[in-house]
Every structure is written in C-alpha cells, then in structure tokens.
Amino acid sequence: MDKLKTRFAPSPTGHLHVGGARTALFNYLLARKSGGSFLLRIEDTDRARHDETAVAKIVDDLRWLGIEWDEGIEVGGDSGPYRQSERLEIYTEHIQRLLDAGSAYYAFDTPEELGAMRQEAVQRKETFRYVRPESFPTADDAEKAVADGRPVVVRFACPQKDVTIRDDAFGEVTMPAGQMDDFIIRKADGWPTYHLANVVDDALMGVNYVCRGQEFLGQTWRHVLLREALGMDEPRYCHLPLIMDMQGRKLSKRDGDVEVHSFRAAGYLPEALVNFIALLGWKSGDREKYTLAELVEAFTPSGIGKSNAKFDRDKLIAFNTDAAAEADADRLLAGLKDYLSLNETNLPDDEDVLRRLLRMNRGFRTFADILGKCGVLFAADDSYGFDPKAVKKVLEKNDGAGYAVLSAIRPLLAEVDWTAEALEKWLKEYCQAGSLGMGKVAQPLRVAVTGTRISPPIGETLELLGRERTLTRIERCLRQGVSGV
RNA sequence: GGCCCCAUCGUCUAGAGGCCUAGGACACCGGGUUUUCAUCCCGGCAACCGGGGUUCGAGUCCCCGUGGGGUCACCA
C-alpha cells in the first residue's frame, strides 16, 4: 500500500457524531496502516453556522476516542492554516484563476429569482439546472452589480462530459454529463463554497486519499472537474456506506444521543465505541473484537461494504460490557472518573472507594450501571424511598417475614466483624442455622439499606455502608414498615 | 421526479460458482450457576427480496422488477 495522506474535515456545528467519528477513524486507520499521515482540518466557510466552541468539542471527542492526528489544528504542520476561515486569500486566488481561464463566471441572480426558476422547473416536472449565459459577465459587470445591490456569486463553468470515478468501495461510478450544472464556487459574501474550498485544500495539503460518507458520492464529479480545471492531481476515493438509525433513516446530527460525547457521558468506554463503529461498514471475516492498534493492523479498504448499516445500541452495550470486563483496574478507574466528572452524582472522588465500587460491580455494562446501583449507598440514610413492590414482596409477604428477619438480625449485626467476607460467612451460617435460603435474609437486608431489590453482593454492600449506617437504615426501614409509609 | 448507489437471520455481517444442510456475533426464547441485578455457562429460534436467464451446478455472474438509501442549496 502506498503511503496515504488522509484527512478528516468536519464542519464545526456541534459535537462529533458517530458517523463523523467513523469517517475520522477510517481515515486514521488508512493513514496509519499505510505509514502515511492523517490530518485534521476545520471546514468553517459558513460564517452563519460557525460555532467556535464546536471546534474544541470535536477535538475533545476525537482525543477521547484515541484518534490522534499528525497534522492540523492544534498540532500544526507545513501546509496550514488548518481552518478554512483563515485561508480566504488562497481560495480567492484560485477562484480568480478559474475566472481568468474562463472556467468560471460571475452570476447575479437573487435567491428569489433562483427560487422562481426552480419552481418553474418543478412545474414542468424537470430537474432544475442553472442555464449558462451566452457570454460571461465581465469584472466590470460584477462591480456594477455590486453597486446595484445585487448579489454577486461565481459559478463554475462545468465541462459537459461524463465523469467516472474509481472508488475503492463502490468501484466505477459514472455521472452522466446531463446531470451537471454550473454550481456556485463563491458565495455572495465572498467565501468559497464547500466544493471549492475542500478541493483546493486537499490538493494543497497533499491529501491523496479521500475517504468520506457515501452522501458525497453523487457529488464527487464536482470535485473531479474542479481539480481538472485547476490542474491538480486527482486523489483516490473511498466512500463509506451510511449509518442509519434502527428505523432505517439516516443518522442525523440532530439526534443528540448519537453524539460521541453523549456516549461518553452515558458511561461507555471509548475502546468499545471505536470497536463498534469500526464494524459499521467494515468487516474482516468473522472476527469482531479489535483494539485500536489491532484495527490499524487489520484494516483494509477491501473490507468496506456497500450497503448501509443500522446503529444497533444493544450490540454496542454488549461490546462495552466485554470491554469493561477486559480492562484493567487502572483503566476502569480512569474511565469511571471521567464518567463521574460529566455527571451530577453524590459519589465521592476517593480513588479507593471508586476502585472498590468497580470491583464489587464486576460484570457491569456501563458506568451508569454502577451509579444506578450504588448511588443510594452515598445518599443520606433517610433520603431514599422504598420501592413498593420490593417492600411487598420481600418484607411484607408471609405476615411480614422480611421485617421479622430484620428485627432478629439487627442486634446480632452489632457484633459481627464488618468485612464483606465475614458478613457473608456470618449470613450463611445464620441461614443454615435457621434452615433459611440466603435470599430470605439477603433480600430484606438489601431492601432495607437500598430501598430496592437490586445491589451488589450483600456483604460488600454492607461493608461499604459501614455498621452504623447499616443499622440506621435497618431501623428506618422497620419504622416505615410499622407506620406503613 | 431526474441521476447515483445498495439488497444474506430482527441487527452487524461471513460468503469472492461446487467447501452452504448458508457460518459467527448481538438481540430474542428456553435451561443452568448465583443472595438480587448484571455477569457467566449450555441449548434453541431465525435469512440468501421476486422473476427470468448463463452454467453440469448460483446466495455467489447477467437482465428486469420490487424495495431501501443518497443526491439534486449562495450547508458542509
């Protein structure tokens, strides 16, 4: 494989979403695998939509995933600047070249006029295509138009010929000449459109491999033609099948919960997300578990599929469960701390406590599970409520057998060694002595100290809580039982 | 609507003409372990969109149909 120089060029409109993350990942993989380089460029030529905080978010999301770039914003490089908003002169210069060569021309239509033309085309049941003027307006005409208050844009005089691109994922795709029209390359505000800026930058920055979502496949002819007119080499292309939601609709940036950041805040591990995302549109045999490093090793464009993939959250959860089970204690601690820093919780930031929480919750699916199960252990002893169903089934049933057990045990608990092991051992012996199943004792205790039937193993739960608080909670539980609250 | 692309279990997919009685994973269902949940173990259900060809032989190649998606912006 030749050394590939790839790029990820997001538009800063918000957090990175999973589709963008996959594009970034594949580009990263391609560059690493080939011994080339990966660059990050910000495409912010749309002044209206520009959101400065979004750049920091995207950078943060990418780094969290472990996707590092060799060149681009924040890290620099030889072909910067890497924000299109800082490259206006470059675009202006190239547009001028096109104008001078007769490959582009000024146009003065207002949005309203364009809209009317489109309407008309729709009524004739035709696809609207901009009609090129007999002769191109001159620079003087353009100045006059400006003086008249008319918008001045520059359109590319599109050569009318079939364009065939060779795509690494889709093979040869031909766009017939009749489908093209003279698209705008410079907007009335003087900024270039995406097509021009993107093509110029890729060429100037030495990008030789363009990997992006399939939504661009039908527009690649513009880039091919533009490059040709500018005398620039063509890169290789590789379009990725789209990621759809479970309803089969295109995953939208507007779906907040599809942002990388929301998975991070929801308690997922980046290695699980990366692994999962890699499998959306790429596969190599039956294997499906990979670390980032293993992906670099295994990745190859031939494994990229053609049909769209649906984003299956259940499978992501399964991946996360496996990733959590395989991660070592330090890794999990860092992940849990990160998760907690993004969420309002009453959990302490004491590392020993956190490590213990991780141990007693072995088998957890996401960090949110830990918070869900153990949050109550850190709440005030009189602050949590009792799940009515749990109370009924575990405490009240059989004439209050659960309450009876609690009453019987409470005084004895004052004497037991307060470690998880000792507590478990003591409980087992207590059960054996009374010919009781563990559940008959452990469940009432669980409901008493957590208000629910769910918690980590009872010994560890009680140890963490401590003797005093355990007794306090049992008393409160007994009291609410009596008062029927 | 024009153009482009796609089509194997519910989902991600393996499959590059005989290896397919179509494989794996997730989900689901059933069972087991366990003091609850989660985990874990065992088992099961489940697909080649339809129709024509080509071929001794098609999930695999071709054509048509159907279905789905994308794109047709002074957004990227």
Image (cartoon, rainbow, N blue to C red):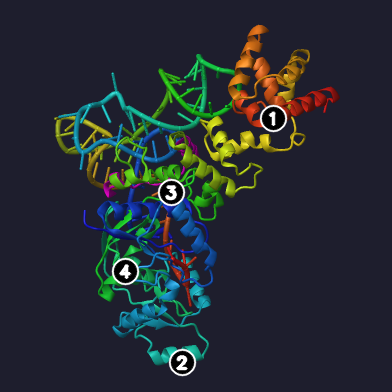
Q: Is residue A201 left or right of residue B73?
A: left
Residues at badges 4 and 2 in contact (C-beta under 8 Å)?
no
Residue type of the residue flagged with mark 3: Ile
Indicate which disc residue A205 carries. 4
Classify mark 3: helix, strand or loop.
strand
Q: CA distance from mark 4 to mark 3?
A: 28 Å
Nearer-N-terminus badge (4/2): 2
State whether residue A132 is above or below residue A297. below
Q: CA distance from mark 4 to mark 1?
A: 59 Å
Residue linked to disc 2: A144
Nearer-N-terminus badge (1/2): 2
Residues at badges 1 and 2 in contact (C-beta under 8 Å)?
no
Residue type of the residue flagged with mark 2: Lys
Residue type of the residue flagged with mark 1: Thr
Front tag of 4 and 2: 4
Residue B75: % across, % down: 47, 68
Q: CA distance from mark 3 to mark 2?
A: 47 Å
In the rendered image, residues at marks 3 and 2 fall on the same chain: yes
Q: Is residue A294 left or right of residue A119?
A: left
Residue linked to disc 3: A243
Q: CA distance from mark 3 to mark 1?
A: 41 Å
Residue A348: % across, % down: 63, 42
Residue linked to disc 1: A450
Nearer-N-terminus badge (3/1): 3
State whether residue A471 is above or below residue A323. above
Check the image and name the residue furthest to the right: A483
Q: Magenta segment, which residues?
A: A298-321
Chain under disc 4:
A
